[in-house]
């Protein structure tokens, strides 16, 4: 891929070592415009540099990635974010997706895979790691009864196909492998994933989800 | 009142209810017919009795007129309770006003024993009713489904307190009307005045003291937590880092160490549950994956949806999944192995998948018992099944399925 059509990226993470590592891994695959270590400088950096995609850490001092998304959204509502985190606590991950991130990958992801995920987010698709797919299935699991306060019950349930696609992602299949298994095109798989992302961001279902309930009972 | 609105379901016939009875079951039966908490009716009867003795007459008439309830009582039919929440207060206020109107009517007609007796008795009856109902609810072994068990403990407490206040107030009014309070007042007044003055003087100190104690306790908890965190990091992370520095020449070993430490730290962060506890199916799968990862040096990523306690069938499922993961790690090459478990209410599914070269199951010699015995056979013995999806170059996926709650 030539440098011209490589997507541009800003990396936001409070660990200097990690930023340097991601930069090195993405070298030549995407164009890294800059990086930032805290919420304020990240917002400034993103608004100034206008990257295609922001690689965003979930947990940072000063409000974390969710705060960055909120602050940027006011000045640059179309900005695309990809959450990149070591955290695998369901609350953190679901919170940042609901704030507006278009995907979540763990920091153990390899360089080429990360570059591929960045490219997909830049194209407007959603990127679900197996773990995120698991969280989403968990969040929409249960009796299937929609949330009582739901405006639109459509939003509170996954279709059978969407569930099937998520299960395959959780099982470690790539989009094109899923397409081949389900006899649909990779584009259709992406459409399903984007639909799930939309439901996740608009539904109130997650507040009733199993892990949220458990967490409240335990604490 | 007597023309009770027809219930959606046919209301029970008007009878005395022996089971719910306090005296003769008249109020309980009436309450069931009218859809009112019998406690309310009892208060009305007591009030009518206190006012001029009419209550006793009515009660006796009804007792004589109504047939006692026989065997025909439908099982599961419950005396409706006054609805909870805000509704219960409006119902209570309405009933209170009705009783008041009734009493004033009696008073007007001259069916009246005297202010000094009637008002205290009415108040005491209302308060007693509240307390009674409270204790009856508490003693009820199986609260009906529409009354959430823990729903409003606060309002329950409030009701009990109101009941106590009513009864105490009734007692005081009775004493006051009978002039029994005068000597007590002479003693009480100075005591109350001194108490109020003392409170005003001491309150600021006391508040500061309480607040200081709370701060101190919070600080102590914080420092304890910090010490615990430091101890944990020292025992785990620092030890591992030291080990990794010494093994820096063996990348596989270092990766394994880092991976194990990561698992432990995550488990600790996510629930304070020490890693390696196998109480649930998901936890047992994680442990099995960690063991495979350590012994074979291939990353095993586990994603679980839902969870359930670990039983004998679950143990078998975990053992089969472990065997599948071992095969995947051995033959599936260096790529990570994916383990996905979906634990639903009626079935558990586990998928173990690698991206290796795959193989032809028919070509496996019959003396190789790994897949046949440890996976397929084991699942079948526990009422489940195992399906193998593989093909040359397509990776391998083992699908394990187990019905739950058989």
Image (cartoon, coloured by chain):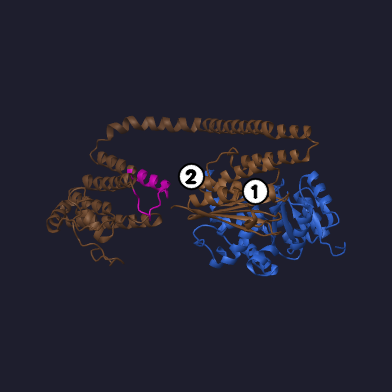
Chain colours: A blue, B brown
Q: Nearer the viewer, residue B168 or B104?
A: B168
- Residue behind mark 2: B312
| B68, above or below B298, in the image | below
Identify the residue under disc 1.
Answer: B327
Magenta residues, start to end: B142-163
Residue B243's spot in the image, x, y percent? 74, 32
A182 vs B168, left or right, is: right
Callout 2 secondary element: helix
Output the chain of dot 2: B
The quarter of the rendered structure image containing the N terminus of chain A is: bottom right
Q: Is residue B262 visible?
A: no
Give yes or no for contact between labels 1 and 2 (Cβ–Cβ under 8 Å): no
Task: Please tell me in which quadrant of the rendered image residue A28 appears.
Answer: bottom right
Mark 2, Cα crowd under 10 Å, few <14 / some 14-19 / many 20+, is: few
Element under disc 1: helix
Extreme residue toward the right, this view: A3
Q: Count neighbours of disc 1 (C-alpha within 10 A) and say few if under 14, some if 14 to 19, many if 20 or more.
A: some
């Amino acid at each position: 891929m030539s440098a011209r059509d490589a997507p541009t990226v800003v990396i936001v993470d409070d660990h200097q070592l990690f930023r340097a590592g991601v930069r090195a891994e993405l070298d030549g695959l995407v164009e890294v415009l800059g990086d930032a270590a805290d919420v304020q400088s990240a917002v400034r950096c993103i608004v100034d540099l206008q990257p295609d995609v922001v690689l965003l850490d979930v947990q940072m001092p000063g409000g974390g990635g969710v705060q960055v998304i909120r602050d940027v959204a006011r000045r640059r509502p179309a900005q695309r974010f990809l959450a990149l985190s070591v955290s695998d606590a369901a609350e953190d991950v679901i919170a940042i997706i609901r704030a507006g991130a278009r995907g979540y990958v763990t920091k153990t992801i390899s360089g080429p895979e990360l570059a591929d995920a960045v490219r997909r987010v830049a194209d407007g698709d959603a990127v679900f790691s197996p773990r995120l797919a698991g969280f989403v299935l968990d969040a929409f699991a249960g009796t299937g009864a929609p949330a009582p306060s739901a405006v639109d019950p459509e939003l509170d349930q996954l279709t059978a196909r969407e569930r099937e696609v998520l299960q395959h992602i959780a099982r470690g299949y790539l989009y094109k492998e899923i397409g081949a298994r389900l006899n649909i095109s990779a584009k259709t798989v992406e459409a399903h994933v984007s639909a799930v992302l939309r439901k996740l961001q608009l539904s109130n279902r997650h507040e009733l989800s199993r892990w949220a309930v458990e967490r409240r009972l335990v604490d | 009142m007597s023309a009770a609105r027809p219930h959606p379901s046919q209301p029970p016939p008007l009878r005395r209810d022996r089971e719910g009875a306090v005296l003769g079951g008249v109020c309980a039966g009436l309450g069931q017919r009218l859809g009112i908490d019998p406690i309310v009716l009892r208060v009305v009867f007591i009030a009518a009795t206190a006012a001029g003795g009419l209550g006793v007459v009515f009660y006796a008439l009804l007792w004589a007129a109504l047939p006692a309830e026989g065997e025909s009582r439908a099982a599961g039919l419950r005396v409706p309770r006054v609805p909870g929440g805000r509704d219960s207060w409006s119902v209570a206020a309405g009933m209170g006003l009705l009783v008041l109107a009734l009493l004033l009517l009696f008073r007007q007609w001259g069916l009246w024993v005297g202010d000094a007796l009637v008002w205290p008795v009415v108040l005491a009856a209302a308060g007693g009713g509240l307390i009674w109902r409270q204790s009856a609810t508490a003693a009820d072994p199986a609260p009906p489904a529409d009354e959430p068990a823990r729903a409003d403990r606060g309002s329950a407490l409030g009701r009990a307190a109101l009941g106590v206040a009513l009864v105490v107030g009734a007692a005081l009014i009775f004493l006051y009307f009978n002039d029994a309070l005068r000597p007590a007042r002479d003693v009480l007044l100075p005591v109350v005045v001194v108490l109020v003055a003392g409170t005003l003087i001491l309150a600021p100190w006391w508040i500061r003291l309480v607040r200081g104690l709370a701060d101190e306790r919070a600080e102590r908890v914080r420092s304890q937590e910090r010490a615990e965190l430091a101890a944990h990091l020292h025992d785990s992370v620092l030890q591992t880092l030291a080990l990794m520095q010494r093994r820096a020449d063996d990348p596989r070993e270092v990766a394994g160490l880092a991976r194990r430490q990561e698992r432990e730290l995550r488990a600790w962060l996510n629930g304070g549950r020490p890693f390696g506890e196998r109480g649930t199916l998901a936890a047992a799968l994680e442990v099995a994956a960690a063991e495979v990862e350590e012994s074979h040096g291939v990353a095993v990523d586990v994603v679980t949806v839902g969870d359930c306690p670990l039983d004998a069938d679950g143990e078998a499922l975990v053992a089969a999944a472990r065997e599948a993961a071992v095969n995947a790690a051995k033959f599936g090459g260096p790529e990570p192995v994916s383990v996905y478990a979906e634990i639903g209410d009626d079935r558990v599914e586990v998928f173990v998948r690698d991206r290796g070269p795959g193989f032809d199951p028919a070509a496996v010699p019959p003396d190789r018992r790994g897949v046949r015995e440890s996976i397929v056979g084991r699942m079948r013995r526990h009422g489940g099944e195992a399906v193998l999806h593989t093909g040359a170059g397509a990776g391998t996926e083992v699908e394990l399925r187990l019905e739950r709650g058989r």
